């Protein structure tokens, strides 16, 4: 099978940072699906894993944690899918990634592809949708059915891949969403995703919230910089509020400053379930299935903003560079092999 892989960890500008390779076709075992990959997406995790370091892989390492495709074969214990099913998923950080023509993935973290989307549109969604879904509905305990309708959510960095789908999920749950974005085009993107208000994270966030007559928020989702916004987060969260972040801290956080308000703070990492083989791994299958149903019902939309074709090393290097720029809105997808 064709694949794109690395042997050394180099800057994306280096033509040897990602290479076109041919690898043996994998064989599904247990609850594995063998998926013929039609489209993939690039996320910050790809860039982080590929980032320069003094290390050499003994054999080509395939990255990639967003895919859409068709089930080619199944392991003997598969229960949820069959050959020919169209699927989308993010996969596991502990296994070879999906930047390959054929890919093995545990069926418990795979969802049926939304029927109304093509492969490129679907590939834009899994990692960010699962991250936002778990952050809002699991970590913050927001009811997707509208029980908490009218409550306020601040999303720091609303125009990125996770923020783009988080805005939509929060609006679906009936929340009043305030998103941050700094450029006119990214501010408009947040509005297009459904944000009720858009403010700048480069300006005084508490002051801007007061200007909206929202001095404190019920929920806060940080998708960009936990350490840099920690003080602001504590200032603008309501008593008994819930905060969640997907960005590791660059220095120890002062959790004590949340005590006076009895605030809950959680980390969200989409790979936790697959990494630790938790008993509830299948929750990701159910979440992706629910997202697909919302997509097909017109309640959510893809966050795809750019597509490259075909899937090869040159285009993947360009995609990594684009994600590294920090100016991405929505998601960048690669589709089709040659």
Image (spheres, grey):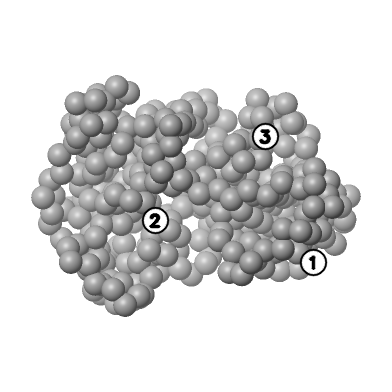
Q: Residue 204 carries which label?
A: 1
Pick whichever, 198 or 61, lies toward us. 61
Looking at this view, name the residue that lies furthest to the top.
79
253 vs 125, left or right, is: right
Residue appearing at x 66%, y 60% in the figure = 181
Residue carrying label 3: 142
Q: Nearer the viewer, mark 1 or mark 3?
A: 3
Residue appearing at x 36%, y 46% in the figure = 92
Pick whichever, 278 or 332, lies toward us. 278
Residue contact between numbered discs 2 and 3, judged by CB atoms under 8 Å: no
Residue carrying label 2: 42
Q: What element carries label 1?
A: loop
Q: Disc 1 and disc 2: Cα gap in Å?
A: 31 Å
What x and y, as percent, mark residue 30?
Answer: 23, 31
Q: What element carries label 2?
A: strand
Q: In which quarter of the image is residue 251?
A: bottom right
What x and y, as percent, mark residue 224?
Answer: 59, 61
Residue 211 appears in the picture as rendered: yes
Q: Earlier in the sequence, mark 2 or mark 3?
A: 2
Residue contact between numbered discs 1 and 2, judged by CB atoms under 8 Å: no
Query: Quick one: label 2, few (<14), some, or many (20+) residues within 10 Å?
Result: many
Q: Which of marks 1 and 2 is nearer the N terminus?
A: 2
306 vs 37, left or right, is: right
Q: Disc 1 and disc 3: Cα gap in Å?
A: 27 Å
320 vs 6, left or right, is: right
What x and y, as percent, mark residue 168?
Answer: 61, 40
């Amino acid at each position: 099978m064709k694949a794109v892989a690395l042997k050394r960890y180099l800057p994306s500008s280096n033509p040897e940072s990602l290479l076109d390779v041919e690898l043996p076709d994998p064989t599904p075992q247990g609850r594995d699906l063998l998926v013929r990959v039609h489209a993939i997406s690039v996320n910050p995790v790809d860039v982080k894993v590929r980032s320069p370091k003094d290390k050499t892989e003994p054999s080509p390492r395939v990255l990639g944690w967003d895919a859409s495709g068709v089930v080619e074969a199944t392991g003997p214990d598969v229960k949820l899918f069959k050959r020919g099913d169209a699927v989308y998923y993010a996969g596991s950080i502990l296994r070879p990634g999906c930047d390959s023509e054929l890919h093995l993935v545990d069926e418990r973290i795979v969802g049926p592809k939304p029927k109304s989307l093509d492969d490129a549109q679907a590939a834009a969604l899994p990692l960010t949708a699962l991250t936002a879904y778990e952050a809002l509905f699991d970590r913050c305990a927001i009811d997707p059915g509208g029980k908490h309708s009218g409550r306020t959510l601040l999303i720091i960095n609303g125009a990125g891949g996770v923020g783009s789908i988080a805005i939509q999920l929060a609006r679906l749950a009936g929340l009043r969403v305030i998103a941050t974005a700094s450029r006119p085009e990214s501010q408009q993107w947040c509005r297009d995703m459904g944000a009720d208000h858009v403010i700048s994270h480069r300006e005084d966030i508490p002051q801007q919230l007061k200007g909206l007559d929202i001095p404190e928020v019920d929920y806060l989702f940080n998708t960009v910089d936990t350490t840099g916004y920690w003080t602001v987060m504590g200032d603008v969260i309501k008593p008994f509020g819930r905060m969640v972040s997907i960005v590791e801290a660059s220095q120890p956080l002062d959790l004590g400053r949340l005590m006076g308000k009895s605030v809950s703070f959680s980390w969200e990492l989409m790979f936790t379930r697959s990494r630790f083989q938790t008993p509830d791994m299948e929750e990701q299958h159910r979440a992706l299935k629910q997202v697909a149903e919302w997509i097909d019902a017109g309640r959510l939309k893809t966050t795809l903003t750019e597509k490259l074709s075909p899937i090869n090393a040159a285009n993947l290097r360009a995609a990594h560079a684009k994600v590294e720029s920090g100016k991405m809105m929505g998601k960048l997808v690669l589709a089709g092999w040659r």
